[in-house]
Amino acid sequence: MSDDFPLGLLFGLLFLLICLSAFFSSSETGMMSINRYRLSHLANSGEPRAQRVARLLARPDRLIGVILIGNNFVNNLAASIATIIAIHFFGEVTGPAVSTALLTITVLIFAEVTPKTYAAVKPERIAFPASRVLEPLLKLLYPLVWLVNAISNGLLRLMGVKSIDGGADNLTRDELRTVVHEAGTLIPQRHQAMLLSILDLENVTVNDIMVPRHEVMGIDLDDDLEEILTQIRTSQHTRLPIYKGDINNIIGMLHLRNAARFLSRAEVTKAAIVQEAREPYFIPESTQLHTQLLNFQKQKRRIGIVVDEYGDVEGLVTLEDILEEIVGEFTTDVAGMEQDIHRQEDGSQLIEGTATIRDINKALGWQLPTDGPKTLNGLILEHLEAFPDGPACLQVSNVRMEIHEVRDNLITAARCWQAPRRR
C-alpha cells in the first residue's frame, strides 16, 4: 500500500499537469485567434467576459508571458515526474529515454495539437472561460512576468519593434472589401453590393458619371420666348440650366416647380424666367463622388454644373446620379430614349459611340479601361491614334471592336464582342 500510493499520486499529478499544459496551450491559441472586431463589439455592449479578454489582449506581451511561464513550468514538472515513473518501471538507464518518447507523444497529441486546433476553431469557447484564470494569474505572477517581458521587449526593440501594445486593428479599404465579400449569407447580396459601391466612391469622380454637355437640356435665352415656354411646359426634367447663347455662359438653374409663378401670368418675359432661377452651382470635374455627396448635403443642392480647369462646362451631375452609384438604378428613363447597347443576333453588341465605358462595363460585365477616355468613341480614337477614314477593327483588353458608323467626326456606333480566351 505504501509503495503503490506515491506511484499512484505521481500518475495523478502527471495527468493533472498534462491537463494544465493543454489549458495553457489552448488559451494561447484561443486568445490570439479570437475575432478582434466581434470582441470589440461585445466589449462595447457590456459583455464582462469580452471586456476581460480585451484587457488581457491590450498587452499581448504580458498575456503571452504569463501563459508561457505557466506552460513551461507544468511541462518541465511533467517531464521530471514522467522520468521518475519511467525509472521505476524501466530502470535508470532505459527509463529517461522511454519517458522522453512517451511524454513527447502524449504532450504533442493531448496538450498541443488537439487543444490548439479546437481553440483555433472555437476561440470564444476557450478564451472567455480562460480569461477568468489568466487575469488573476497575471496579477499573482506579475513580478516574474515583468522581468521576462523586460528582457524580451528589450530584444524586440533591438530588432526594430517599438510598440508592444495590442492597439486597435485598423482595416484598409481593400481589407474591408474582403470582409464584405467573405460575409456570405450574413450580409444579403444586395447589401454587399451597396457597401462595395460606397467603398468605390473614392475611386470615381463626377466626370465619370456626369451627363455630358452635348446631352444637357437647357434654356437658351437667345431663343424665342414662345419656344422657351414650350420647352418649359414639355420638359421631362425638373431642373433646367439657363444660359445665354452658349452653354458655357450659364446664369442660373430653373426648378420647374417655380415655373408656375410666371406661367400663370398674362404676360411672361425672359426677365421673369431668370428671376425665378437659382444661382448655378459649379463643380470641378476631378471632384471625387464621396466628397461631392457631402458637398451636395452641405450646400443643400441636388444638381451641379461640372466644369474643367479652364471653366468650360463639361456636363452636369445630380444627387440622384451619385445615389445610383450606391444603390443602382432606381429611376426610369422618363425621356424614353433608346438604350445605348443593342444585342445582335450573332451575340455581339451594337453600342452607341457616346455610351460611357463605365456603363458598358456594368451592363455587360466587361473590363474595359476606365482610367482614360470616358466614352466608347474616345476609347476607340485613343487606340487608333487617328480618326478612321472608314470601317476599322481593333481589340481593347479582351473586347474586339468593329467601327459600324462614323458621322461628323464622331464614331456613332461600333459592334463589339468579347474575344475567346486562349487556352
Image (cartoon, grey):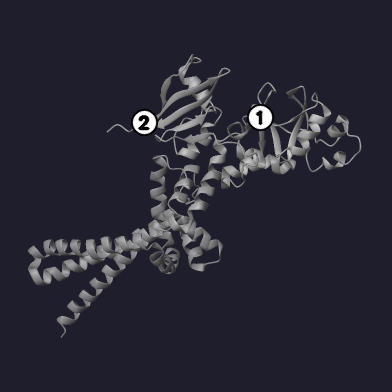
Q: Along the horizontal axis of the image, is 106 left or right of 318?
A: left
Residue occupying image coordinates x 50% and y 31%: 351
With respect to residue 305, does 328 lie above or below? Answer: below
Q: Secondary structure at mark 2?
A: loop
Q: Nearer the viewer, residue 78 or 371?
A: 371
The image shows residue 133 at horizontal and vertical percentages of 41, 69
With respect to residue 260, does 379 lie above or below? Answer: above
Say which residue label 2 marks. Answer: 419
The image shows residue 347 at horizontal and vertical percentages of 40, 36
Q: Secondary structure at mark 1?
A: strand
Q: Amino acid at mark 2?
A: Ala
Q: Amino acid at mark 1?
A: Gly
Quadrant of the rendering where the N terminus is positioned = bottom left
Residue occupying image coordinates x 53% and y 62%: 43
**Residue 22 appears in the rendering:** yes
Q: Along the horizontal axis of the image, is 386 left or right of 71?
A: right
Q: Which of the 4 image quarters holds residue 31?
A: bottom left
Residue occupying image coordinates x 84% and y 34%: 273
Q: Which mark is residue 315?
A: 1
Q: Disc 2 versus disc 1: distance between alpha carbons?
A: 34 Å
Q: Nearer the viewer, residue 98 or 375?
A: 375
